[in-house]
Image: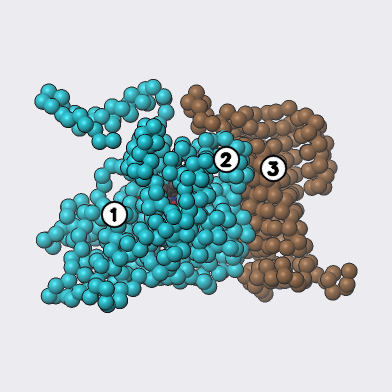
Chain colours: A cyan, B brown
Amino acid sequence: MTDERTESIGMRESALFDRNVIHEIQRKAREGIYDIRGFGAKRKVPHFDDLLLLGASVSRYPLEGYRERCNTAVTLGTRFAKNPIELEIPITIAGMSFGALSAQAKEALGRGATAVGTSTTTGDGGMTEEERGHSEKLVYQLLPSRYGMNPDDLRRADAIEVVIGQGAKPGGGGMLLGQKISDRVAQMRDLPKGIDQRSSCRHPDWTGPDDLEIKIGELREITDWRVPIYVKIAASRPYFDVALAVKSGADVVVLDGMEGGTAATQDVFIEHVGIPILSAIPEAVDSLKELGMHRKVQLVVSGGIRTGADVAKALALGADAVSIGVAAMIALGDNSPEYQEEYEKLGSGAGYYDDWHEGRDPAGISTQDEELGKRFDAELGGRRLANYLRAMVLETQTLARACGKSDVRNLEPEDLVALTIEAAAMARVPLAGTKWIPGLDGKTG
Amino acid sequence: MAAAEQTVEQVDLSRSTVRELNQRLHDAADGGPQSWRITHPNGLHAIGAGINAPLELEIDGHVGYYCVGMNKEATVRIHGNAGVGLAENIMSGTVTVDGDASQSAAATGRGGLVVVRGNAAARCGISMKGVNIVVEGNVGHLSGFMAQKGALVVCGDAGEALGDSIYETHIYVRGSVAELGADCIEKELGEFHTAELTGLLAEADVDANAADFRRYGSARKLYNFNIDNADAY
Ligand SMILES: Cc1cc2nc3c(=O)[nH]c(=O)nc-3n(C[C@H](O)[C@H](O)[C@H](O)COP(=O)(O)O)c2cc1C
């Protein structure tokens, strides 16, 4: 889908009104409605690519690749839960709803994650047998909609995640359009088939941090204090929100940056609300440190994590683990060139396809269509995901060893420099080759 | 029944913790006392949350937030008032409050019956998914917000934005309605609904005549997005 046209003299594309903007104005004028889509932010924002790791040399020594151990295991939920979650790798699978994804795709996420010793997460729509059955460690989300919420699933979950926000849409509710509401999805959500489902943006039975603390108390009572309780927030005011989550009794804080993926959200929301994860992690870590809770309440971060380099840099900034959504879908087979022709028929292309809300995904992943769903092989998808996760972990270890770390979580801000002034200011690490951290004039927070 | 099975287990919450009580109530699913009397609840939170057995509970006094949250099968009577989120996400069983209930009573409930003898505050039955709720007094604003399934019976008056963005819940109100929410309209009280209402009033042990109620439900205009309805959002 590369555009063959090139600019010639006398045909100058406006930076403000580029072809995408013009196309969108024309579409809005025709249809009178905003654009809804899946995927994460497509605009360029300061990200982990704007940071570099400083390898070891004379002043510190590296570890031998392939020989010296570099630990990747991490335990989440050590604060209050009787049974914290022990992960073999610091990469988890983010919450993606059954409804947004096919049952087969959910199964594949479980298979892949379990093969490498990490956790998967349910989503807005409840827990399916497929994912419970194939996920050794499953995190059960409690969302404002409470679709499918029930105490039996709470009791068979390995952790509970109270979802307050999602990076793609801080302050927004969920959306599952009618075309994806099959009989099974409708039945799980107690709604008629074929109607749009607008999940609310606020929880129905609590408002504010004082209530949240009591709500978390109730969840602990129902589960006899066995499992960890995570609180997931969208990155917007992380310094304060993390403090309030900790005050409310969270065992783990999940922080999702504005780059974070979604199954269906207004484009204007995806691109214009929230802050990049790069800028959110230092604020969150500051907050945890001030409360004496860094590493005691674990921090899981997400939003555009693609490679072991992203993982290493997120950990270096102080996260305990990361979480992936879009990358996991791509690993399963979404946007695969195998379906190029069919993506084109949908007016898109492999590598561009983001109409996950429409339910016509040729790869059988973001769909409830039975025929499309059958195309997707959960076993194969699971293997691909496991391969991808293994490769990312190897990358992370390679970088950690190069920095002389025997545990990936020993990476630290001191191992990082920034390539741009923006990234230096946001990540609070010096601009490469300088001692300059813009904005850090003795103040934090 | 053997005499032992009929004994009522007494728990005084001024001497024992909610945690101890709840653990015992959960363990009772595998055998143990079936009848419980709880004293000095003193507004404590999450009393009886997560019960998973057909127990009988009498609670003497006022309870805090999320009393018997997510109840399955138990029959519970609260001789007092209830805090926020009474019987939230109830699955089955019956919960009766002699006094008033605070906000979000029976929120997201998926089955069973919740009866409030006094008034229920704002957001009663918010996002309800199959529970039946009978309130003898009034309900506050935004009651039945995004209500999906089940029935909400209000013997007194209803506050503003009743049934806003409602799906398939049946709402019955005997008194006045301050204002209907988006997409909520008055509907005819036909035979089917009269029978449903009569049944619920009897089940809740409320002396009222179904013919005195009006029925409200969804106009179903917001079910699929239509740009012409944008002002309703
Ligand atoms: C298809 C899809 C469905 C999602 N569904 C949910 C959901 O149900 N609940 C939730 O909290 N987040 C949901 N998310 C957001 C993810 O949990 C996560 O925050 C995000 O994908 C992380 O960013 P990344 O996709 O760039 O890795 C969804 C994301 C995607 C891509």
Instruction: Tell me, yes or no, whether the two marked residues, 2 and 1, touch with CB atoms within 8 Å.
Output: no
* Vertical comparison of A208 with A288: above or below: above
The image quadrant that residue A345 belongs to is: top left
* Residue A175 x %, y %: 49, 40
Q: What amino acid type is highlighted by mark number 1? A: Ser
Query: Given the image, on which type of amino acid does mark 2 rest?
Result: Ser
| A48 or A258: nearer the viewer | A48
- Is ligand 1 within 8 Å of the beta carbon of the residue shown at mark 2? no
Whether tag 3 and tag 2 are in contact, CB under 8 A, the answer is no
The residue drawn where x is 54% and y is 31% is B224
Front residue (pair A68, A320): A68
Q: Does residue A5 appear to the left or right of A340 in the view shown?
A: left
Instruction: List the residue tagged with mark 1.
Output: A279
Residue beneath disc 3: B150
Q: Is residue A4 visible?
A: yes
Where residue B79 appears, as percent x and y from the top left, is: 75, 58
Residue B104 spot, x, y in % from top left:
61, 48
Q: Is residue B89 left or right of residue A163?
A: right
Image point (41%, 25%), residue name: A32
Report whether the residue tagged 1 is closer than 8 Å to ligand 1.
no
Residue type pointed to by label 3: Gly
**Label 1's element?**
helix
